[in-house]
Image: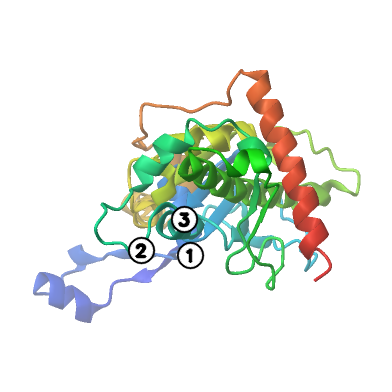
Amino acid sequence: PNSIAGYLSSEYCTMIFGDNNDDHKIPISVGSGDNMCSAMGVGCVTPGNAVMSLGTSGTIFGVSSTPVIQDGISGVAPFQDATGKHLPLVCTMSCTGVLEYVLNVWCNNDNDDSKAKMSHAEATTQAQSISPGCQGVTFLPYLGGERTPNWPHATGSLLGLTSTNMNQKNRVGLLYRAAMEGVTFVLADAMIQLEQACSSRNDDGGDDKDDESSTTWKTLYLVGGGSKNPLWRQMIADVLNVELKFPKEAESAALGAAFQAAAVASSSNNGNDGDAISVDKYIMDQPIDLEDVVVRPTQDKDVLEAYQKAFKKYQTLSKALFDHQ
């Protein structure tokens, strides 16, 4: 990862500097994929840390010192990171797009232009008044199928309706929160698959409690458009039982690629041709701009129990409907 792949050609040196002087010998790093570079850009380079991206799709990837077992079933991609370690990854189809559909179709009337459209912030405010568990309503958010788990023919479902919750005055808040909880449960299920795939590498008797091979993510760096929602932040921390941190740099992949190139350039400038400075150690020495706020799981046992009950119900219902596919 910290090797020099080559040097900028004389043609491009001439284009940039106007000459091909030896002083312009510019090393080129090996580069990497977008998720790998994003991990570097948020400073996620040590085991025990992971990144969750809340975009049109949801993505979770965490650093591991040992490879995962690819069983062809779990949906965990056994990638390597860009520092010499491993970066197992899961991706879900159901994420912010689900909330967008719910907002536009259920919270707003697209055919009525006479009324101002409700924003995600306004829907979130209403959802905050609804208790965890959504009064027994379970939203299975598979509007376009799902890839983790591998249920391409799954469909969205709204379950647990009663005469009581259907008469809820704050219907917008109930439906929006139910959708948010449903997406969060998809992500939680995906993270369980990720941890199980990582844990399977120790089936031969290895010690999975060693810090360097831990499969429990202590910290999640939350990125993507959905990461700005305050209700969703706390919900994810509570359901997944993890601490959340929030990088300020929106283009984390570009920053990570720059970090890798800088590590190579630093070694080259010292005459070591990329062998002296490891990429992860270089990144750990760099200041990563994070928001001042850190979101931790609530200490309210009633809230945690409500989420656990709702999550188990989600797992039972989703498997009963779609696990046979």
For residue 106, which numbered disc appears in the image? 3
Q: Is residue 171 above or below residue 12?
A: above
Residue at 43%, 44% in the rendered image: 227
Question: Which mark is first along the chain, 3 or 1?
Answer: 1
Q: Which residue is mark 1?
A: 33
Residue type, label 2:
Asp
* Secondary structure found at label 2: loop
Q: Quadrant of residue 218?
A: top right
Q: Which residue is mark 2?
A: 110
Q: Is residue 325 above or below residue 77?
A: below
Q: Is residue 296 above or below residue 55?
A: above
Q: Quadrant of the C terminus?
A: bottom right
Residue 47 visible in the displayed image = no
Percent position (x, y) of residue 268?
Answer: 35, 55
Residue type, label 3:
Trp
How far apart, in angstroms, are the residues tagged by discs 3 and 2? 9 Å
In this picture, residue 127 sits left or right of residue 315: left
Residue at 32%, 45% in the rendered image: 249
Residue at 58%, 65% in the rendered image: 143
Of residue 54 and residue 105, the one placed in the foreground of this image is: 105
Residue 208 visible in the displayed image = yes
Percent position (x, y) of residue 117?
Answer: 30, 53
How far apart, in angstroms, are the residues tagged by discs 1 and 2? 39 Å
* Secondary structure found at label 1: loop
In this picture, residue 105 sits left or right of residue 91: left
For residue 203, which numbered disc appears in the image? none
Question: Which mark is first along the chain, 2 or 1?
Answer: 1
Percent position (x, y) of residue 127?
Answer: 48, 37
Q: Quadrant of residue 207?
A: top right
- Is the C-beta separation of discs 1 and 3 under 8 Å? no
